């Protein structure tokens, strides 16, 4: 009798729970998951509502990246992803999508619309797989200025489909002095320039994450007036590649901390590292990996780097390595073993703590911007 009673009580309690799981945490938690030079970043609000930006690689990488995302989702106590933002239709961003959807319910699929750069993998996914997935839940095509409803957060879309917001966000819009030295690059016809970019505000804490948005589009967003404003955290654009990350963006944002989702040989270019190191207001850069393209010359100390490689070399190169390209180029150092995230826990007063899950090293950045 007693058991039956408690069982029915449990059912009642379960039914009374809201759709999003209830958490005791008061922080906005952000997991930058290692997907080997792709992107997967999980945001979990104190309400338990979650937004995942991108799903990492698929294809030959198999379920590796979705499994790594699931580890972060489990750590956060999630039983569903409330919104999945696909920044753009490149395989290092949507590749893990189908496998992830088999592992956890996804309630809202967000993107910039059809691809402008059809490739076999993205076409196959968009024509056959994707409609089945969002058909069972919700599909949202965003444009700059849109909001994504997440309880406790102000989530604004600032770029999408090659366009940027024309009106400054609240508190932003000052002239950006780093526009003066901006030199445009050739127009980018790829999906990168279509990236869905977000600015997330949690009390006084602000983050910007622009996917793989490229150089000239940074100018459109940040010049002549900085419509984003200043931020606490900058998720470095495009893995730290030098076709993104102009001074107009990186210096204009005046972020306190930057986190780079680079791979062992993707991103972390010397000129980008220099731009970040010379950014006004920047206190630390954290990285997913050591990049051989940086060499010791430009890398952060290992304490700020989340992941090793499978066969750790006994020495690290001092000089940056030129990216080998073309047929017969040696593959980058592989990392298919255990992966570690960098986790940010932010408070509404603007203070936040960044933790390297590999070594447990963490650093708290006080409020008071
Ligand atoms: Zn990418």
Image: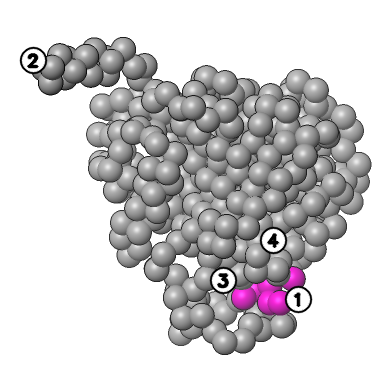
Callout 1: 10 Å neighbours few (<14), some, many (20+)?
few
Callout 3: 10 Å neighbours few (<14), some, many (20+)?
many
Residue plotted at (55% across, 41% down)? 30
User: How far apart, in angstroms, are the residues tagged by discs 3 and 2?
Assistant: 63 Å
Q: Nearer the viewer, residue 272 or 347?
A: 347
Farthest residue to the front: give it: 2
Could you say which disc has been placed on residue 265 in the image? 3
Which residue is label 2 attached to? 1
Q: Quadrant of residue 367?
A: top right
**Quick check: can you spot residue 311?**
yes
Where is residue 38 drawn, in percent x and y? 50, 56
Query: Magenta stretch?
Result: 292-298
Location of the C terminus (image quadrant): top right
Residue contact at pointers 4 and 1, CB within 8 angstroms: no
Horizontal relation, residue 184 to residue 164: left or right: right
Which residue is label 1 attached to? 297
Residue plotted at (44% across, 39% down)? 76
């Amino acid at each position: 009798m007693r058991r039956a009673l408690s069982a029915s009580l449990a059912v009642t309690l379960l039914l009374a729970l809201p759709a999003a799981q209830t958490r005791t945490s008061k922080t906005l938690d952000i997991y930058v998951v290692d997907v080997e030079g792709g992107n997967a970043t999980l945001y979990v609000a104190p309400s338990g509502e979650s937004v995942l930006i991108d799903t990492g690689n698929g294809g030959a990488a198999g379920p590796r990246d979705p499994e790594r995302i699931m580890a972060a989702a489990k750590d956060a106590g999630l039983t569903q992803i409330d919104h999945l933002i696909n920044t753009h239709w490149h395989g290092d961003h949507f590749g893990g999508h189908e496998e992830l959807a088999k592992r956890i319910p996804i309630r809202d699929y967000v993107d910039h619309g059809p691809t402008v750069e059809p490739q076999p993998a993205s076409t196959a996914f968009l024509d056959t797989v994707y409609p089945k997935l969002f058909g069972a839940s919700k599909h949202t095509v965003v444009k700059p200025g849109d909001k994504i409803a997440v309880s406790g957060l102000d989530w604004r879309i600032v770029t999408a489909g090659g366009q940027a917001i024309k009106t400054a966000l609240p508190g932003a819009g000052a002239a950006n002095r780093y526009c003066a030295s901006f030199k445009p690059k050739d127009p980018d016809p790829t999906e990168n320039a279509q990236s869905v970019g977000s600015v997330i505000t949690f009390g006084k804490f602000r983050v910007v994450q622009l996917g793989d948005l490229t150089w000239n589009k940074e100018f459109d967003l940040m010049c002549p007036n900085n419509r984003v404003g200043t931020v606490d955290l900058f998720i470095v654009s495009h893995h730290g590649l030098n076709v993104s990350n102009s001074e107009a963006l990186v210096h204009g944002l005046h972020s306190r901390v930057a986190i780079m989702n680079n791979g062992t040989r993707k991103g972390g270019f010397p000129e980008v590292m220099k731009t970040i190191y010379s950014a006004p207001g920047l206190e630390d850069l954290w990285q997913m990996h050591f990049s051989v393209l940086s060499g010791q010359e430009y890398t952060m100390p290992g304490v700020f780097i989340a992941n090793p490689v499978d066969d750790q070399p006994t020495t690290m190169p001092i000089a940056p390595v030129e990216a080998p390209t073309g047929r017969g180029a040696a593959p980058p150092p592989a990392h298919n073993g255990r992966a570690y995230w960098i986790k940010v826990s932010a408070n509404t007063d603007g203070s936040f703590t960044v933790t390297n899950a590999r070594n447990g090293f963490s650093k708290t950045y006080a409020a008071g911007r």
